[in-house]
Amino acid sequence: MAAGAGHSPIEQFVLKEYIPLEAFGFNASFTNSSLYMVIAVSLITGFLILSTRWRALVPTRLQSISEVFYEFISSTVKENIGPQGMQFFTLVFSLFIFIFVVNLLGMIPIPGVTITVTSHIVITAALALMVIGLVVLYGLYKHGFGFFKLFVPSGVPAWLLPLLVPIEIISFISRPISLSVRLFANMLAGHIALKIFAGFIGLLLGAGVWAVLSPLPLALTVALTALEILVAVLQAYVFAILTCIYLNDAVHGAH
Amino acid sequence: MDPVAAKYIGAGLAAIGTGAAGIGLGTLFGQFLSGALRNPSAADGQRGTLLLGFALTEALGIFALLIALLLLFGV
């Protein structure tokens, strides 16, 4: 692959253990991924507390940034789940702002330290399983076994049901898979593409007369970085809105 | 066939799926634009749906790229 000086684009995803710990036979070390999660949570908590410190009725500039985030998620939740969806507001807000900050932190290149937390499938799988687990458990709690009417769309002739219900069940089971893999693959592919194109710049510069062409991969890397920042924000929004859509199925039962 | 060669060929075939995502995205944005140019005042209200559709379609193209990357780097 395009590996200048022996750096492969996969190297950036290797975890570095800062404090080796062990829990029940599992490797529970404090890695750079854990460090970035701690940084993200401290940043979010600090920003939200600091910006709403004065609780002004007419918001200051900092407070209005927090209000934009609040209003954005609040309107998304109310639109997709309805007014009783506000009981899930803190979950959706936490998911959105955590994925948002963690994706953007991964775009800041500090050599040897930076890692995008969501570029590991275990993180996104944990988030997606939490969302789908909530959907199933809340649906069972609210509708009892009527929750399974979700798999039987209304207005379908009875002879079609043995074909349709397994398809609906499979498409429901594919939700946590697609939710987690979407975020993971977007982050993984984006960062690999960034490192490959950045490697091209160095390769061209070291190839003698072709060095005049090296501004081309540089321009492409800059454009790709802009695209990656857009994708980072967009994937957080998509995770949040899909959470709202799945919760709508749990709250409002069948189609 | 040499398994490493088969992996590389498989990765190349898997990456064709990203072109299919391009077709989907072109259709999506084209339909949005044609609707928005007919009814500009209703366009802003659907921007959220447009971004959601973009992300969902792009996800499938990225799944194809993921298979290619798994074949190349992930054994």
Image: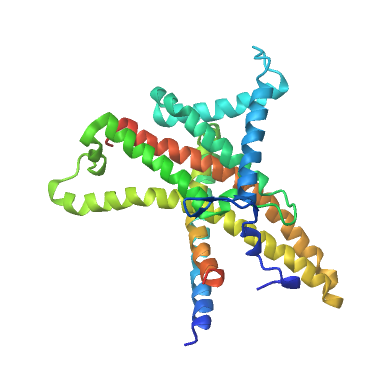
Q: Residue A231: where, in percent of width, then height?
A: 60, 48
Q: Can residue A37 be seen here?
A: yes
Q: How many marks?
A: 0
Residue A84 in the image: above or below residue B60: above
Q: Residue A26: where, in percent of width, then height?
A: 49, 54
Where on the picture, by quarter, is residue A5? bottom right
Q: Dividing the image into 4 quarters, which one contains the C terminus of chain A?
A: top left
Q: Between residue A176 and residue B50, name the one nearer to us.
A: A176
Q: What colouring style does the render use?
A: rainbow
**Residue most toward the top?**
A57
Q: Between residue A190 and residue A123, name the one nearer to us.
A: A123
Residue A135 in the image: above or below residue A188: above
Where on the picture, by quarter, is residue A143? top left
Q: Residue A27: where, in percent of width, then height?
A: 53, 54
Q: Can residue B39 be seen here?
A: no
**Residue most toward the bottom?**
B1
Q: Dividing the image into 4 quarters, which one contains the N terminus of chain A?
A: bottom right
- Seen at 33% across and 31% down, the residue is A251
> Is residue A33 found left or right of A162 in the rendered image?
right
Q: Residue A150: where, in percent of width, then height?
A: 26, 40
> Is residue A4 found left or right of B11 in the rendered image?
right
Q: Between residue A212 and residue A81, name the one nearer to us.
A: A81
- Seen at 81% across and 63% down, the residue is A215
